[in-house]
Image (tube, rainbow, N blue to C red):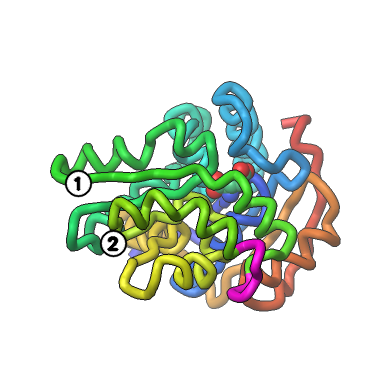
Amino acid sequence: LALDNRPIGVFDSGLGGLTAVKEMMDLLPNESIVYFGDTGRVPYGTRSKETIIKYAKQDIRFLLKHNIKAIVIACGTVSSVALNEAIKESTVPTMGVVEGAVLGALNATKNKIIGILGTSATIRSEAYEKAIRAVKDDIKTVSNACPLFVPLVENGYFKKDNEIAILAAKEYLKPLIEQNADTIILGCTHYPLLKDVIASVVGQDVTLIDPGKQAAMALKESLKVNNMLSLNKNGEHRFYVSDSTENFSHYANFFLGKNMNSSVEKIDIETY
Ligand code: DGL
């Protein structure tokens, strides 16, 4: 049995990718993880394609300095807008969150109507629609950009009974409810934090697809098939950010659903 104890590199525009890290920690406890959250330049979702590509390349160059064996792009925006450029920049196997989420949604839908939520850049790219059409041609899709969701989450407004979050969700989900979507892709890694709020608006019969969870499952499968699983007893987790480490540690606990017992270090991403 081959083994590969090198860490997995994960990056996001900020805190959101930690929802994917949480799923990876649960599903792949032996794997070490190096996380970069670009907290100094968040959000990516409102920026141009050129800027998102430039940022994604820098994030990848930073992670590649850490002797990693693979990269998970835990950002819906980068996965939607810059996946090909990111893969070209990377020297290790690199995956985004779109494909796994799409496969999860295709498995879940019964009425063949899939809703897609994401940042403005993600929705503009139509990456999820294209990935759906590549697999199946009889699926109806309805999408909506949710520009207020990321700042709501990053400011802690995501609890089930938060009235501001509920109002925003009602507004953004209107077209998806009108079109009768029975499955909704939370196409941004921040959105799983709003799962309870979104569920309370759409009702329990609608399946919500968490991109981080789908990515963790796809990663596990891929490491297994390629004999690249780690045989460490316990993975080590290291976190890097491009802005204040205190703010990150505080909110990281929400995203990870537990206390982050690891150190956080600030780096200058512009030098990569
Ligand atoms: N976490 C990012 C994503 O998944 C959203 C935040 C941003 O706009 O940078 O799209």
Could one spot residue 8 in this view of the protein?
Answer: yes
Tell me if the residue at label 1 has its CB under 8 Å from ligand 1. no
Residue, disc 1: 139
Could one spot residue 11 in this view of the protein?
Answer: no
Is 166 on the left-hand or right-hand side of 118? right
| Among the 4 quarters of the image, the one containing residue 220 | bottom left
Q: Nearer the viewer, residue 111 or 170?
A: 170
Residue 23, image x, y percentages: 49, 68
Q: Nearer the viewer, residue 229 or 126?
A: 126
Which span of residues is magenta-colored?
159-165
- Label 2: which secondary element: loop
Where the N terminus falls, by quadrant? bottom left
Mark 1 Cα shell of 10 Å, populated few (<14), some (14-19), many (≥20) = some
Residue, disc 2: 182
Which amino acid, by three-letter code, is at mark 2?
Asp
Is 135 inside the magenta-drawn segment? no
Is 108 on the left-hand or right-hand side of 58? left
